[in-house]
Image: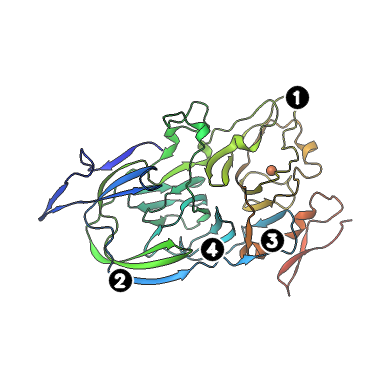
Amino acid sequence: MRYVSLGEVPAKRHSQVWRDNGARRLLVEEVLGYEGFSGNESILYHLGSPCRIDQIGEFRTLDRDAWLPDAHVHRLADTGPIEPAGDPLSGRRALMFNGDIEVSICKPVEPMAGFYRNGEGDEVIYVHRGRGTVHTVFGSVEYRERDYVVIPRGTTHRWEPSDDEQYWLCFHTPGEIETPSRYRNRYGQLLEHAPYSQRDFHPPSELETFEEQGEYELTVRVRGGLQTYLLDRHPFDVVGWDGYVYPYTFNALDFEPRAGRFHLPPPTHQTFQGPNFVICTFAPRMLDWDETSVPLPYHHSNIQSEEVMFYAEGNYAARKGVNIGSITLHPSGLPHGPQPGAVEKALGAKHTNELAVMWDTFRPLEMTAVWREHDNPAYAYSWNEDKTLTPSLDEEEGASVVTGPSA
Ligand SMILES: [Fe+2]
């Protein structure tokens, strides 16, 4: 990230900053940084202590409701039918997780009453549908469809959607969300060959400073649960900050896709990385241009990876059973590739209008009951032309079963 400064910041760090607003008082300086004092940091100047609480609330453990499938197969789930519910925090329903990443769907319909801070992880929210504002202690960030909203741990914030329909893909990681180091020079600046430039990243544009007393509920994600506190001062009391840690947006359509004479592998589309995972953007793009090229991925066995793809836009008619909002999971240990007939159909295609978000994890993922509810077990057979792909629902079990070979 680049250096950003908003509001009043003194010439020297750790010096006296006085505010005369009726009564003369010292501002409270807070250094918010990673890796002790060795990582990136920002310095914020508060009107009051950020430690102050009025009442300690309850602690609630987050139950991700793991589901252990009885078979190891390729999987497909359509997140479209997931009912909107909850607020921007309570509405998150985890689909899968491991020690490095947790992925949820959120379709909030209720306003967020209080404030939220993730105290044990960075978050990336991919906005599939909706727009609005994230109000943060660093200032406000506008978001719109196709934005990745990156919120560093420790950022007190509140989502304020402005559209009725909100449909988000939420990533949480106990690690750090970064852009790949191979896109940067030794000073940290993005290189000319990177698929985006510094101009594509949008930090807070406006600082919101409140000197208000009242009742403010703050929820902090820590130790695998949510701890609430009641504050008697508005948490956005920052008059200035500067540094390298702050929330920002990056729009998927600002990702400059690469293509080659022959097919390029997924790392070409890499957008972010965290510990043992990557997030990639498959943006609309020209396809491989050699007249003998095969414009679809070759079959591959990513022996150590779980490959998960969220289909955001485009026509997926060629991929059986896949709709906008569907997610495929191609787990480690199994090869995958285009379904029968797809390559032949794609030959000669010059461009694709598809937009997809992919995350590859290098350690196995666990599924949840939410995934189980939307799991389509017919997908595992979709490379077999002799099988039908219409699952019938076994209502007693609530699980889908394959109807058997097609005519
Ligand atoms: Fe793949």
Kind of residue indicated by mark 2: Gln
Kind of residue indicated by mark 1: Glu
Question: What label does residue 131 carry, if any?
Answer: none
Q: Which residue is mark 1?
A: 291
Marks 3 and 2, the one that precedes in the sequence: 2
Location of residue 114 (image quadrant): bottom left
Q: Residue 384: image x %, image y %?
A: 83, 50
Q: Residue 102: image x %, image y %?
A: 55, 56
Residue at x-position 42% and y-position 33%: 199
Q: Which corner quadrant holds the N terminus?
A: top left
Whole-angstrom CA distance, mark 2 to mark 1, is: 69 Å
**Circle 1/circle 3 CB separation < 8 Å:** no
Residue that lies at the very extreme toward the bottom in this rendered image: 396
Whole-angstrom CA distance, mark 2 to mark 4, is: 32 Å
Q: Residue 250: image x %, image y %?
A: 47, 41
Kind of residue indicated by mark 3: Asp
Q: Residue 352: image x %, image y %?
A: 65, 36
In the picture provided, is 202 more to the left or to the right than 317?
Answer: left
Residue 263 seen from this side: yes
Above or below, 399 relative to 382: below
Kind of residue indicated by mark 4: Pro
- Mark 1 lies on a secondary structure that is loop
Whole-angstrom CA distance, mark 3 to mark 2, is: 43 Å
Q: Residues within 10 Å of mark 4 (few under 14, many from 20)?
A: some
Task: Give the mark toward the camera: 2 or 4.
Answer: 2
